[in-house]
Image: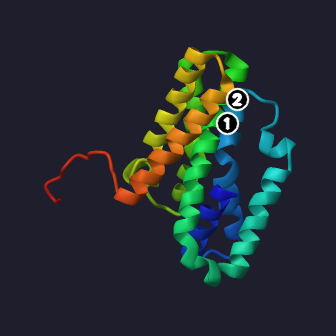
């Protein structure tokens, strides 16, 4: 739902109709996990096996379509939920990879990041924008650090719950701090800057 909200808001900002809002909310909400499932060779992605994922994204889109003028002023609150969603989805992806492939560092980190940031990348591409994860604040980096912390906590403690809590807390915390203080990674200076 957290990711679906950002997709719906983005669609509304780009003057999409109700169908466009539903599609962008759904893509943002489930695309990362769906792509992960396809890459890992699942017969069907979880988002198609369990219809609750798509039902939640569609419901979110319809609610935002109907209540946008009242909810617009709460955008900062939705960004905080997006940060929590990033942490949760990153760890869900990392856990998914761990359950399938064991302690494979590269697979765990890539699965965590893809699950966390995949939907947001597609959302921005669909509205013809450079994905925010590549240019603004710590987003992909927060997901990366969260997935790595999940891996090393699991390696050191052997406790998946400890890895889950630390991974979510680090990812979400880094994202929230980056938003508050407008932290960005260094960029190449062009002669036009």
Residue 173 against residue 180 in the figure, above or below: above
Q: In the rendered image, which quarter is residue 41 located in? A: top right
- Mark 2 burial class by Cα count in 10 Å: few <14, some 14-19, many 20+: many
Nearest to the observer: residue 178 or residue 107: 178
Badge 2 element: helix
Residue at 56%, 35% in the rendered image: 167
Numbered badge on residue 92: 1
Residue at 63%, 55% in the rendered image: 28
Give the residue at mark 2: 96
Point out the image quarter for the N terminus.
bottom right
Q: In the rendered image, which quarter is residue 78 located in? A: bottom right
Q: Position of residue 175 (x, y in %)?
A: 47, 49
Going by the image, does 79 lie left or right of 66?
left
Q: Position of residue 33 (x, y in %)?
A: 68, 41
Going by the image, does 95 lie left or right of 148?
right
Q: Position of residue 193 (x, y in %)?
A: 17, 59
Q: Position of residue 54 (x, y in %)?
A: 79, 55
Residue at 26%, 45% in the rendered image: 186
- Whether residue 83 is visible, yes or no, is yes
- Whether residue 14 is visible, yes or no, is no
């Amino acid at each position: 739902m957290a990711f679906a909200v950002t997709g719906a808001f983005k669609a509304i900002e780009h003057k999409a109709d109700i169908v466009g809002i539903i599609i962008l909310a759904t893509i943002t909400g489930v695309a990362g996990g769906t792509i992960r499932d396809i890459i890992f060779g699942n017969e069907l992605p979880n988002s198609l096996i369990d219809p609750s994922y798509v039902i939640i994204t569609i419901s979110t889109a319809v609610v935002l379509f109907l209540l946008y003028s009242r909810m617009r002023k709460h955008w900062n609150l939705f960004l905080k939920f997006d940060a929590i969603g990033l942490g949760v989805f990153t760890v869900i992806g990392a856990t998914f990879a761990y359950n399938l492939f064991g302690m494979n560092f590269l697979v765990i980190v890539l699965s965590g990041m893809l699950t966390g940031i995949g939907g947001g990348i597609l959302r921005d591409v669909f509205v013809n924008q450079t994905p925010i994860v590549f240019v603004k604040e710590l987003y992909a980096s927060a997901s990366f650090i969260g997935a790595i912390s999940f891996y090393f906590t699991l390696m050191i403690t052997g406790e998946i719950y400890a890895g889950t809590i630390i991974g979510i807390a680090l990812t979400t915390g880094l994202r929230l701090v980056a938003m508050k203080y407008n932290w960005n990674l260094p960029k190449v200076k062009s002669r036009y800057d």
